[in-house]
Image (tube, rainbow, N blue to C red):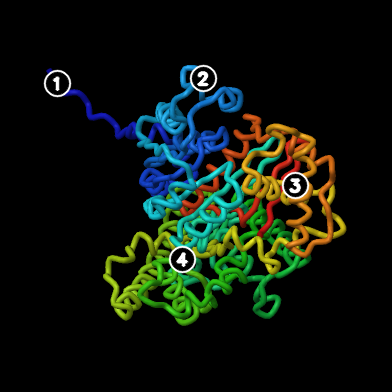
């Protein structure tokens, strides 16, 4: 009996399971996600929704900290819980239910309050990649903010109260290599072709079978001869170039049509944007030390390469758009770009090794693979520097530019102040507004909000309707609102862990009554 034919390679079970998200952040991003550990403080409906949206894509593990037991109130708010859990540890119950969603994820719980952890085990948080908290009073929030800022651990505080929701990201510094910009431009180097590309341009005959890049280059050279070596820079000039190409067409040649369509986007690649210049001028880039992260060491090497070796241009990414052409000429062109991209990345890598040696750091601190990815994504590098939540209480904070004296009522700024006042009320009074006596708490909450605004130096007031609405909620969550905010928080956690896409900077507010959202920095 003959042996069976060899099977074609198949995806692993894990690759199949996470196929769609791997398309978003790649195998390396998934690897970072699977090695991450997340801490949730307070097993609210919002907190459970955050973890649900992190457990499903496969984080490494999570720990829930909550010293309460499941009550009747929890059953009316949190869809994860049912009557069989009444009187049991809320942290354990939620941990068990969430872990059922993905058995690859490790779950743990701690039956203690946030206040107890901060007082007795402050180093507890040091092993986590991100800490998430909801439903804290102001005192606990401030203590947690200070502790996590000192430990340099990303912290996300989120709220879900009635029809309102908010997210506040606290992070010292977050460096993004793969920002995935919406308006990504292909870097084709038509204005400054590198030697191998120039040789290819000169040796290739233009036919209907070659990629449009060669067609466009041919007409750009003609344009330069006609206009003193300049490239088309405005709409009128680019329109004229389009007509030149169109006039030369002898039939329905797709590569000519593609060249015409590409004129607006094919030029200008490789230039250093203002945001990248700002990163190059950053003190962390110009003054390396032994504590410098690999990001800043590679950035310093990248800067040296751009300024000294590459005529002020970024490394070539080596990626081409799809083009209508015969297979052989397209692959030939693709290989030319890839080889140049490898050459540029190797140059930057050698400079990294030089800096590592000068700093007395191990050679394997930075890998060639990391440098190649860095060079490929160099045009989209981003650095986010955040602020501490406790600093919002200072009069010099950014909150003054957000809360306008004359226009606070009827805006999301008013909702932000109301939510902050809610937390201060809980800290000072020991209960949530509206939990017992709505009318009495309305007066007290308004007093707290007015004093808070006065402390900030803002001469305004919160509307009575909003204060009454906050008290009417009595601290309750609406699960659909918690699900929406929870999904948003999980998205920010994934951005932080994978170091891909830009996180919010740094506050997000949501009003479900009017379907309004706003993002701003405090």
Q: Which residue is mark 2?
A: 82
Q: Nearer the viewer, residue 372 or 360?
A: 360
The first of marks 3 and 4 along the sequence is 4
Q: Nearer the viewer, residue 49 or 340?
A: 49
Disc 2 packing (10 Å; few <14; some 14–19; many ≥20): some
> Percent from the top left, x then y, of residue 418?
74, 47
| CA separation in Å, label 1 and label 3 | 74 Å
Mark 2 secondary-structure assignment = loop
Asked whether the beta carbons under mark 4 and mark 1 sit within 8 Å of each other, the answer is no
Asked whether the beta carbons under mark 1 and mark 2 sit within 8 Å of each other, the answer is no
The first of marks 1 and 2 along the sequence is 1
| Residue at point 29%, 32% (across, down) | 8
Q: Which residue is mark 3?
A: 415
| CA separation in Å, label 3 and label 4 | 61 Å
The first of marks 4 and 2 along the sequence is 2
Asked whether the beta carbons under mark 3 and mark 4 sit within 8 Å of each other, the answer is no
Q: Quadrant of residue 213?
A: bottom right
Of discs 1 and 3, which sits in the foreground? 3
Mark drawn on residue 2: 1
Mark 3 secondary-structure assignment = helix
Q: Nearer the viewer, residue 474 or 285?
A: 474
Disc 4 packing (10 Å; few <14; some 14–19; many ≥20): some
Q: Which residue is mark 4?
A: 200
């Amino acid at each position: 009996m003959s042996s069976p034919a060899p099977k074609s390679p198949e995806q692993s079970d894990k690759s199949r399971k996470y196929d769609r998200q791997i398309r978003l952040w790649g195998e390396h991003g998934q690897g970072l996600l699977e090695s991450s550990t997340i801490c949730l403080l307070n097993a609210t409906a919002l907190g459970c929704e955050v973890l649900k949206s992190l457990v499903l894509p496969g984080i490494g593990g999570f720990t829930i900290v909550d010293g309460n037991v499941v009550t009747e109130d929890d059953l009316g708010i949190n869809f994860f819980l049912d009557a069989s859990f009444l009187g049991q540890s809320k942290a354990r119950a939620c941990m068990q239910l969430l872990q059922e969603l993905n058995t690859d994820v490790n779950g743990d719980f701690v039956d203690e309050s946030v206040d107890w952890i901060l007082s007795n085990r402050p180093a507890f948080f040091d092993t986590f990649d991100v800490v998430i908290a909801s439903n804290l009073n102001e005192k606990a929030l401030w203590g947690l903010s200070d502790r996590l800022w000192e430990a340099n651990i990303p912290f996300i505080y989120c709220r879900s109260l009635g029809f309102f929701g908010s997210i506040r990201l606290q992070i010292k510094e977050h460096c993004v290599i793969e920002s995935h910009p919406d308006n990504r431009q292909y870097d084709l180097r038509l204005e400054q072709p590198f030697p191998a590309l120039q040789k290819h341009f000169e040796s290739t005959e233009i036919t209907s079978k070659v990629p449009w890049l060669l067609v466009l280059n041919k007409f750009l050279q003609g344009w330069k001869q006609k206009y003193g070596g300049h490239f088309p820079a405005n709409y009128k000039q680019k329109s004229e170039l389009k007509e030149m190409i169109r006039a030369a067409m002898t039939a329905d040649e797709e590569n000519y049509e593609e060249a015409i369509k590409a004129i607006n986007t094919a030029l200008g690649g490789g230039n250093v944007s203002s945001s990248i210049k700002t990163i190059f001028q950053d003190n962390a880039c110009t003054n390396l030390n032994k504590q410098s992260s690999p990001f800043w060491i590679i950035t310093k090497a990248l800067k040296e390469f751009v300024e000294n070796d590459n005529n002020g241009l970024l490394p070539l990414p080596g990626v081409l758009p799809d083009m209508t052409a015969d297979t052989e000429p397209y692959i030939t062109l693709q290989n030319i770009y890839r080889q140049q991209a490898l050459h540029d990345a190797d140059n930057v890598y050698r400079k990294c090794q030089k800096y590592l040696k000068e700093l007395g750091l191990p050679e394997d601190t930075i890998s060639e693979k990391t440098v190649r990815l860095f060079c490929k994504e160099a045009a989209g590098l981003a650095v986010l520097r955040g602020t501490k939540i406790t600093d919002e209480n200072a009069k010099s904070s950014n909150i003054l530019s957000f809360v306008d004296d004359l226009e606070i009522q009827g805006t999301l700024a008013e909702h932000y102040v109301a939510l902050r006042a809610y937390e201060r009320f809980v800290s000072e009074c020991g209960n949530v507004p509206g939990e017992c006596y709505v009318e009495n708490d309305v007066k007290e909450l308004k007093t707290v909000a007015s004093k808070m605004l006065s402390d900030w130096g803002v001469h305004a007031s919160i509307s009575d309707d909003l204060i009454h609405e906050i008290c009417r909620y009595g601290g309750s969550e609406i699960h659909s609102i918690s699900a929406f905010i929870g999904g948003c928080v999980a998205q920010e956690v994934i951005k932080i862990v994978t170091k891909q896409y830009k996180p919010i900077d740094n506050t997000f507010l949501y009003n479900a009554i009017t379907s309004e959202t706003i993002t701003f920095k405090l």
